[in-house]
Image (tube, rainbow, N blue to C red):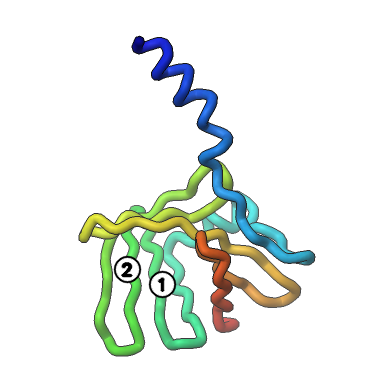
Amino acid sequence: MTRLLILALLSAGPALAAEWPTKPGDVPLSSEELDALAGRTLTFFDDGQAKFSAGGSYSYTYASGDAAFGTYSIAEDGSVCIAYRNGFGRCDLYVRSGDRLILIDEKGDRYPVRPE
């Protein structure tokens, strides 16, 4: 029985991988660019700010001043996954599209990052 469960989980693995809805010209960040997120704060056009700390801590500060805290990690597919303290989690893909850095969420919504 255990073997069947393991086999089912292994065969389901590729089906669980995210299919990111990229557009022509989107280039996912390289592993070096993803590593360079540590210590950076990205500001979005709604004035929200995503802060990636060198130790893996993460915070998102909304324009209202409210904040959500957690940790981040880089997944094998190059997405950035956030585990919030409240138990919520999400993964996003960061891409370059021309001169613009864009966050793509799992629903396919696109959020451009303000230039620094």
Quarter where residue 69 is shown? bottom left
Where residue 63 appears, as percent x and y from the top left, is: 35, 88
**Residue at coordinates 34% horizontally, 56% vertically from top-left?**
89
**Residue at coordinates 49% horizontally, 45% vertically from top-left?**
75
CB under 8 Å between callouts 2 and 1?
A: yes
Name which residue type carries label 1.
Ala
In the drawing, what numbered circle is on residue 59? 2
Query: In what quadrant of the picture does the N terminus appear?
Result: top left
Name which residue type carries label 2.
Ser
Quarter where residue 47 is shown? bottom left
Compared with 66, 82 (above or below) is above
Question: Please, which residue is most extreme toward the right here?
Answer: 24
Compared with 97, 82 (above or below) is above
- Whether residue 11 sits left or right of residue 86 in the image: it is right
Q: Nearer the viewer, residue 41 or 66?
A: 66
Badge 1 crowding class, 10 Å Cα cut-off, few under 14, some 14 to 19, many 20 or more, is many
Mark 2 / mark 1, whichever is N-terminal:
1
Query: In what quadrant of the picture does the C terminus appear?
Result: bottom right
Alpha-carbon span between mark 2 and mark 1: 6 Å
Compared with 83, 64 (above or below) is below
**SS under mark 1:** strand
In the drawing, what numbered circle is on residue 50? 1
**Residue at coordinates 78% horizontally, 66% vertically from top-left?**
25
Where residue 26 appears, as percent x and y from the top left, is: 72, 64
